[in-house]
Amino acid sequence: MSPETSLTVLLVEDDDVAAESVVRGLGKIGAPYPVVWAEDGMVALAALRGQDAQRRVPRPRVILLDLNMPRMNGFEFLQQLREDPVLRDDVVFVLTTSDADTDRTRAYQSHVAGYMVKAAVGPQFAKLARLLSDYHGAVRLP
């Protein structure tokens, strides 16, 4: 994928402040990625499956996933995503407050591309924004 190809970011996050910080972090580095925000796994799956008229998440896309959410948490979302033949190959980065080894291991067993602890990605998610920018410039997504 070239930098000219649009990349959509699906942010699956129940915390309004964290979601806004991610959007601001991307904006600060001039990342031209539209961000679609889903407040939990159920909303995210509906958007990915085209069942939400308000949220469109075209390919190529990257999913930023919180683990601790109401209704459908990140692990439940990952299970549903990986079982869906249309969605199973979507690229997912976990972005969470949990630094537990068990959560990290479980996430990687669900084939996430990376596991980031919110406290470690820097003020206003600057490291996350740079990671997405570098990732977008270096890989080719379906």
Image (cartoon, helix red, strand yellow):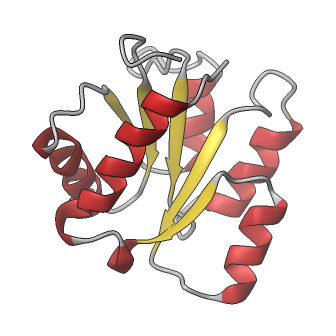
Answer left or right for 77 relative to 109: left
* Residue 76 place in picture, x, y as percent: 73, 57
Q: Can residue 38 be seen in this view?
A: no
Residue 5 or residue 59, whichever sits in front: 5
With respect to residue 45, does 102 lie above or below?
below
Q: Quadrant of the C terminus?
A: top right
Answer left or right for 28 relative to 107: left
* Residue 116 place in picture, x, y as percent: 50, 68
Q: Which residue is drawn at 26% across and 71% down?
A: 122
With respect to residue 105, does 50 lie above or below?
above
* Residue 29 place in picture, x, y as percent: 16, 42
With respect to residue 120, does 64 lie above or below?
above
Answer left or right for 23 relative to 66: left
Q: Which residue is drawn at 42% across and 55% down?
A: 13
Q: Residue at x 24, y 25 (%)?
A: 32
Answer left or right for 136 relative to 140: left
* Residue 71 place in picture, x, y as percent: 59, 58
Residue 142 or residue 97, whichever sits in front: 142
Q: Residue at x 35, y 38 (%)?
A: 133
Residue reaching furthest to the left: 28
Residue reaching furthest to the front: 138
